[in-house]
Amino acid sequence: MTKPVILDCRDVWKLYGAQADSFLATHPDPSPEQLKKAGLIGAVRAANVRIHSGEIFVIMGLSGSGKSTLVRCLSRLVEPTAGEIRFEDRDLLRASEAELIRIRRKKMGMVFQQFALLPHLTVLENAAFPLDVQGVGRKTREARAREVVELVGLKGREHYYPRELSGGQQQRVGIARSLAVEPDLWFLDEPFSALDPLIRREMQDEFMRLQNILHKTIVFITHDFDEAIRLADRIAVMKDGAIEQVATPEQLVLNPATDYVAEFTRHVSRAKVLRAASVMEPVGEGRFAGDVPHDAVIEDIADRVEAADRPHRVLRDGAAVGQITRAAIIDVLVGRA
Amino acid sequence: MTVRRIGSGGLFWLGLFAATWALSAYSFQIYKALDARWVIRFPKGWQLPLERRISDFLDWLVDSASFYFFSFKDLTRAIAAVIEAPYQFLRNLLIEGFVSGQGDSAVQIAPSLSWIAVIVTIAAIAHYARDIWLATLVGLCFLYLAVFGQWDSAMITLASVLIAVPIGAAGGLMLGIAAFRVPLVERILRPVLDLMQTVPVFAYLVPILILFGFGPVAALVATVIYAMPPMVRITIVSLRAVPPEIAEAGRMAGCTRRQMMWKVLVPAATPSLMVGVNQVIMLTLNMVIIASMIGAGGLGFDVLSSLRRLDIGGGIEAGLAIVVMAIALDRASQAFADRTMRHAPGGNILQRHPWTGTVVLVIAATLILGRFLPAVQSYPEALTVTTGPVWSQAMEWINVNFFDTFEAIKTFILQWLLLPVKKFFAGIPWAWGIIATGLAAWRVGGWRLGLLAALLMGFIAANGLWAKAMVTIYLCGVSVFLATLIGIPLGIWAAERPGAGRVILGIMDTLQTLPSFVYLIPVVMLFRVGDFSAMVAVILYALAPAVRYAAHGLRAVPPELIEAGLVSGCTRRQLLWRIKLPLATPHLLLGLNQTIMLALSMLVITALVGTRDLGQEVYIALTKANAGQGIVAGLAVAFIAITADRILSALAEGQRRRLGLT
């Protein structure tokens, strides 16, 4: 990962309770017991996150794990108690009110769990809202709003009011609104959690389609590990306000750092996560049934490799780096790997 | 633990009651035995000089207070001028027409809006708010005012409402926003609002009368002050109720503070804000009617003067006109609250605004036609229908045929309920009254509440108002008791049978929109003046919350619990007594609380039908323009209300906690 870091969050704390600031000044690194004794709630504890340009970074955790608070610290909707957040090499926590407004107007977009659409505005007006706030003229902003509304597949419904739309459609409006200013950094706070499972799946596909067009830098919050694995380049697993592990989905499954992470990954279908390079063995003698790329997900190549009598060769940049056998595939599929 | 508490709790209340009863029954003997007159009368020498202080302060304000550049009098004159100008404009527009010049040389420039134009305009507004049916209803209501000869008075009342509502609603919104933004403002406003809601309306008519003089401006000032507090409250609550995500969406879009308020929070809160505006309208109408006592004129004045002349027919006619107007204003403003965003129709300007177009056309047409056909300008007098004599005859007939029945009922209730209760309360020595209230409050809500209750009662005694306060408490107590006795079964009925429920709750809704003044009319006609009449009027006025909260509480019982009861084999009766009612007690207590508040506010108005309580004290103060007396008596009523409110809220809270409903 050599892409530049766009958002760098170092040792961020968010404590709730009386005199949280002074407490943290005297106890620079309090333990959960110390916090409890002081009557404070550690919503975010010593979080370190670096988000690279163009990646999908998923923050995963159960309710109450602090993931929503962390993402609000990153966008400074919530004021962190301590720590440093650098956005495009500027200290976000030192930014003045006016500067913050400018950054949010030009650089950030956010999608919310309950959609957070303005009930008195139409689809088009909702999508144009961030531009309206900036003082963009009606013609220009409505033209741009039309583009994003079309992008999310709501063409023809520009003049509907939010209450006239289904949940999935409302979230499409939320997405359109967050994209209207062409943000560099896109926050999505459990965007699909309020939707039915079928719609959720459809929206995830839609989201991947959009990302393939737009290549945004994304911070995505979810409590659904399957969703995290499906979408993420990297995942941060949170528990009780602290980050347990930051890794790619594959690494999480192969090398869970803590028991807590292991507990999550235990029931994950490994074929969906592991890639050829992780299960290959050294290249052997003899002939091969075919070639597979080193970063192919097992699920996608399982049929082919399992049906062949001979192993497949694993290629990286055109060179053979190993081979993958039917037995290895079956190990993954039955969960022995 | 629980069992023990209930046991000792019962003993506590029984003991408190027994002690109070004994002291009440034998207070006179105790006074004689001890030769201590202070037992039954608060010593004159101990009385606080609050009344005089307040009066002196007001005199000082009016006569000599000044702030560097202007005197206080200039300030009130400026306020009066600001209100007077638009009010006069509306009066010209609706009633008098526009003239230039003075006296005999006056020349009419333009006539007032014709009755047809007013009706069409108001119907158009109703159509905009909902549909053609509401437009018809509202149009018919106003047509009624014209046909039954109430037009001019009704327009005076409407002009006052039209001035007071925007000031009240906008002022309330601004104060609410300030309180929402600045915690300090809220901390200051909250107790003021609490007090404003409980101080009886008559009480602040007095200082306003002194500051602004008798007339429509004073009435408007009083009306605005009276109608604003609920708007402030609703604004704070509805801004808080905007989902946090919507506020965050606004911040992430890069809203400035001002944009945040006016582009995000206020629009998102609009439906609930409109509920507040509806309340402002209804309270305004209520107060405009009452404020006829300090010169508002209009329908309220008609009622008042008919009551004074005992002109039965005239009173009922004007009263009905108020009812009709209240219904029209209430339904139309409620429709605005429920109104959802609609798609704007396309087409040219007339197609897009069919009603605006029609209204403009009708106004123009009646303006021109009115010059030649007087019937278009103002509804022809020959065609008005007077129902006054009919009502008078009907009343006479009732009084002739049912006089004995009514008299028997009245005597029975007076003898067996009102008088014994009155004797009990009147006998309680003031010192014990303070202690007993304190003890009861302590028992229910801890020592802080106990202390507060004792202090508030002490204030009443210390201002020499104990005897009158006891009359207020007795009348209020009996009325609330009867209202609950009637209201809760009605509420149960409404909750159990949806069909009956719609009718009952519909009637209650309408009853609650009526200005309190209206209730006096039939009561006085049937029962003349006195405690019994006051009681009946108070029961009618305060019935609605008892019914509503009971129905709501029963309906709010979780369905699983009812199913659990059914599965356990409960009969309907068992279901009601064992499951629904116990779970509804917090709601019932809140309903009781509301009933008491309404009863107290009505009780003050019943001073007009001759009660001898705190209400009378306020009323006397009003007629004598004695601000100190009015304010102190008003505060006494407010303190009774606050004590009752705090005790009942604590009870409801305790009950809720016990049931695990928090």
Image (cartoon, rainbow, N blue to C red):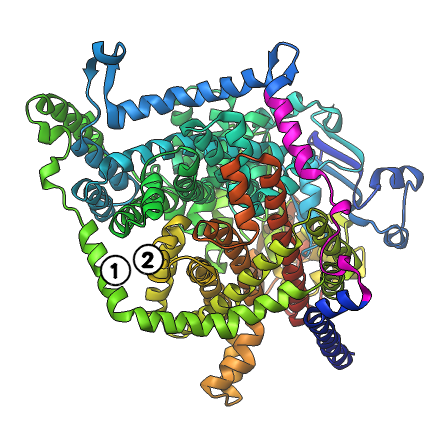
Q: CA distance from mark 1 to mark 2?
A: 7 Å
Image position of B545 with respect to B238: above or below: below
Left or right, B159 with respect to B184, comes to: left
Residue pointed to by mark 1? B395
Amino acid beneath label 1: Met
Left or right, B328 with respect to B76, comes to: left
Amino acid beneath label 2: Met
Residue A192 in percent (x, y) is at: 53, 51
Look at 16% across and 33% down and name the residue there.
B116
Which quadrant of the view contains residue B207? Answer: top right
Left or right, B101 with respect to A331, comes to: left
User: Which chain is indicated by disc 2?
Assistant: B
Residue B418 in percent (x, y) is at: 52, 68
Give the residue furthest to the right. Answer: A26
Give the residue furthest to the left. Answer: B372
> Is B61 contained in the magenta span?
yes
User: Which chain is indicated by disc 1?
Assistant: B
Residue pointed to by mark 2? B525
Residue A219 in percent (x, y) is at: 63, 40
Q: Which residues are magenta?
A: B34-62
Circle count? 2
Look at 22% across and 29% down and name the residue there.
B356
- Residue closer to the observer: A230 or B73: B73
Asked which secondary structure carries label 1, the reply is helix
Asked whether residue A32 is in view, the answer is yes
Query: What kind of secondary structure does the magenta stretch mostly adopt?
Result: helix
CB atoms of marks 1 and 2 within 8 Å = yes
Asked which secondary structure carries label 2, the reply is helix
Asked whether residue A273 is in view, the answer is no
Q: Which mark is residue A317?
A: none
Image position of A219 with respect to A180: above or below: below
